[in-house]
Image (tube, rainbow, N blue to C red):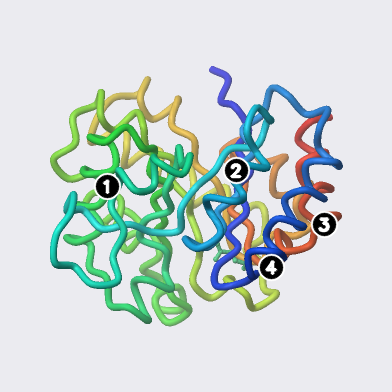
Amino acid sequence: MSRRKFIAGNWKMNNTNEEAIKLVSDLLEKVKNVTDKDIIVAPTFTTLSDVNKVLKSTNIKLAAQNMYFASSGAFTGQISTDMLKSVGCEYVILGHSECRTIFLETDELINKKVKAAIEAGLKPILCIGETLEEREKGITNDIVNNQTKKGYDGLSEEMAKNVILAYEPVWAIGTGKTATPQDADTVHKTIRQTLESIYSKNFAENTIIIYGGSMNENNADDLLNMPNIDGGLIGGAALVAEKFARIINYIAK
Ligand code: PGA
């Protein structure tokens, strides 16, 4: 079994158009020799089009940070799959904990988005993870397994192959606190068992499960060395080209 390493930068609500173009241009310069790995950036909606122009024919792929499941219509403020594809997106982050907690997105809504994304030919990066309170109560596994099951609900194995899972403990996001490599690996293993129970061993073994939550240029090596951690979803450290490139160049070694 060999899963490809997958490193995605989630820029969140950062960067004007000019700043986004500069960041991605600086990054390209630093990772231009990395060819056989999945490198993804997720800028804001407003900068996707221009970032896509910079990324054309390069080794970095584009993701959106969210989308809506309907194809068009009276949904003020929302973005459809066709709109994302028309500006070069291949991936879309769904179910990020900030969308779950601040914008009250439910597992049901996220599942509809996952289905719509796959049907449109986009690959969802589906985020799951427990809060600090849930971890302290000892129910981390229940939470992530439940979110996994609900996220994949109704997906055939063929459809589900398009999903990349991101385990992001909520207490580690943007806080500087990281799960230890061993703790993260244990949760990834549990998630793999859940996937096996829904689909098959082969499916579970081939699913890319990445870690997110204060991953940076100093701790990435140890996390990415773990057998069940296939990459990273990186927020803060992805906003600095040198730091993000350092993480990418580690997996390229
Ligand atoms: P962080 O964010 O790296 O800043 O913790 C990760 C994420 O939310 O995807």
Q: Where, by quadrant of the figure, is residue 173 drawn?
A: bottom right
Q: Secondary structure at mark 2?
A: strand
- Give me the residue at 38% from left, 44% from top: 124
Say which label, 3 or 2, has the lower sequence index. Answer: 2
Q: Residue tagged by mark 4?
A: 236
Q: Is residue 6 left or right of residue 132?
A: right
Say which label, 4 or 2, has the lower sequence index. Answer: 2
Q: Is residue 17 above or below residue 120?
A: below
Q: Residue tagged by mark 1?
A: 114
What's the mark number on residue 40? Answer: 2
Say which label, 3 or 4, has the lower sequence index. Answer: 4
What's the mark number on residue 243? Answer: 3
Say which label, 4 or 1, has the lower sequence index. Answer: 1
- Give me the residue at 45% from left, 25% from top: 206
**Amino acid type of the residue tagged 2 in the rendering:** Ile
- Is the shortest distance between ligand 1 and the CB of mark 4 under 8 Å? yes
Q: Is residue 46 left or right of residue 220?
A: left
Q: Residues within 10 Å of mark 3 (few under 14, many from 20)?
A: some
